[in-house]
Image: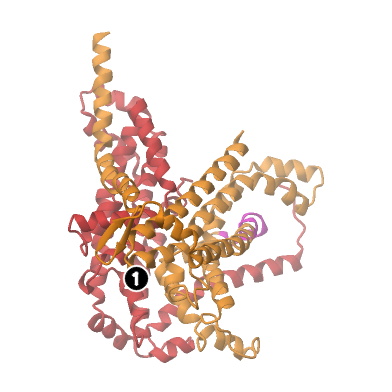
Amino acid sequence: MSVVTPRSFSRLIIWILLIIGAFLCIFPFYWMAVGMTLNPNDVVKGILVPGNEFLKNVEKATANYNLPQFFLNSMIIATVTVLVGVSVNALAAYGFEKFPSKARDWLFGVLLLTLIIPQIAIVIPLFRLVAFFGLLDTHSAIILPFLMSAFVIFFLRQNFSMFPTEIMEAGRVDGAGELRIFVQIAMPAMKASFASAGILMFISQWNSYLWPLMTILTDANKTLPIAMSSMMNAYTIEYGGLMVILTVSVIPVLVVFLAMQKQFVAGLLGSVK
Amino acid sequence: MNQKGSFAKYLNRMGWFFVAPALILFSVFMLYPILSSLYLVTRKWKGFTDSFIGLGNFVRMANDSLFWNALGNNFFLMLIQIPIMVFLALVLAVVLNQGIRRFRGAFRLMFFLPCVTSLVAYSILFRILLQTNGMANNIMLDLNLLSEPIGWLNDSFWAKMTIIIALTWRWTGYNMMFFLVGLQNIDSEIYEAAEVDGASKIYQFFRITLPLLVPVILFSIVTSTSGMLQLFDEPNILTNQGGPANATMTAALYIYRQAFVINSDFGYATALSYMIVILAGLFAWLQIRLLGGNKK
């Protein structure tokens, strides 16, 4: 690389713009955190120094709005989706990639084709199906339709293509069954991809709005996004308590992001590297 | 020979075994709904009973100016927001890649941070922030940037701007990440050769960086377009059900309201959603044409 002559003025402009940009990105998080400690009027007005109503707001969020229940509902739904969903999709990705056949390749093409269909078009007939099964207003209604994800299968299949088939053959020679080869050899080698896929499925379920909005009817079954959005429709909005619930809804994803940045970004962008 | 044949059969059986759970879920929760929509689209609901009306739902759609207005809003938001966001994301990516040497990781992290918020959470935050007596107006009034408060959520022009600003906040860092990956895949030898030839940084950007990034930029435009076509959370929460006076009504929100809020007409909602599927298919076809043509 050649030596770049320091052009301090344009440098300065770049730094100022970067700092303004970064400030705009993190400011809402700061404001949300401060908002937890303020009374409703001060939240709206935009007071930016912490107040002393934190405990009061926490109490509102838990006593008036049953925050622990919403959190638990969201957590159960997202966790079950990740555990079962990643398994189902990983098995399928492995089957499509490592056991090639014309019929399965054709089916894989059909799977990919359905990725084009926007969610709003699927949820209407899906609603009637779920109602027919008698699953309205249950966690199963939110989990079952989104366990299989064509995108996750596609993502994992790409990653499985880097897993050498020779290792599978060596396992077969040693007398291991196919399922055992998958669980004991392929899965440990693919940990990073599984983490990305798991994060992707966790977030899309944790943040899901349209489908739970249609299927959840009672307070006790509400997820965090549904609970928050219905708080905004109340006659008087408890802004302080709302800020507590907002923060609680953001923290799990924030923690996963900070702890596993690489897999998080890979999952969201749908590619590794 | 015979043994080889039976081993191939065994592998084929195992293949079906691995894909079976996913295929069953796919058939029940994806294929069946798609097929049943073909039935729904020919029915008209009145209260709890429905009757056959053939293509009547499509005739109704053709004359539904509210729906076309909503779809127009989708395209308006698309045409304004995506170029702004892609431009900002590109500038940030180039600056983080070449413009600075220190704190790259920290800036990348901060710009990506909006992506951890759910669409519902950030829509609520922006709705509180942008109330007429809210913080954004208060700060700008205090700094004398405004003489009177802006009706971010009550004025039909500003409500659209509100959605654009919020979307840009949420997604610029996400797109920046695509561009960063794209920039890192460009061979640094090309730049070294350009330096030797005495090409300026600006010349390098327009003649080397930009052309090599075209596939990534197209990909990001396509992804954003398909997201914009389905825009739902923001107009429903941030601008309170597509308000004011349908200024931010989008197609997806209109369909949802037809099926669940105003009417329970699943037949008509299905017909409207077919229009969205057709548009999504069209965009996907364009994507394959554009990206496929660049691969050679």
Q: In the image, what residue occupies the spot 38% across and 50% down? A: A196
Residue A60 appears anywhere in the view: yes
**Where, by quadrant of the figure, is residue A69 drawn?**
bottom left
Chain A shade: red
| Chain with colour orange in the figure | B
Which residue is tagged 1? B261
Relative to residue A73, is residue B139 drawn left or right?
right
Residue most extreme to the top: B1
- Identified by mark 1, the residue type is Val
Q: Residue at x 56, y 61 (%)?
A: B75
Query: Disc 1: which chain?
Result: B
* Residue A136 located left or right of residue A214: left
* Mark 1, other Cα within 10 Å: few <14 / some 14–19 / many ≥20: few
- Report the side of B232 relative to B30 (left or right): right
On screen, residue A188 above or below A7: above
| Vertical relation: A19 (above or below) A61 | above
Q: How is the image coloured?
A: by chain
Q: Name, please, the residue furthest toward the left.
A: A134
Considering only vertical position in the picture, is A122 above or below A210?
A: above
Residue B140: image location, x then y, percent: 60, 86
Pinpoint residue A48: horizontal percent, then vertical percent: 48, 86
Left or right: where does residue B85 sit relative to residue B14?
A: right
Query: In the rendered structure, does residue A238 fall within the stretch colored magenta?
Result: no
What secondary structure is the magenta-colored segment mainly?
helix
In this orientation, which residue lies closer to the viewer: A88 or A24? A88
Q: Nearer the viewer, residue B245 or A262?
A: B245
Q: Which residues are magenta?
A: B91-104
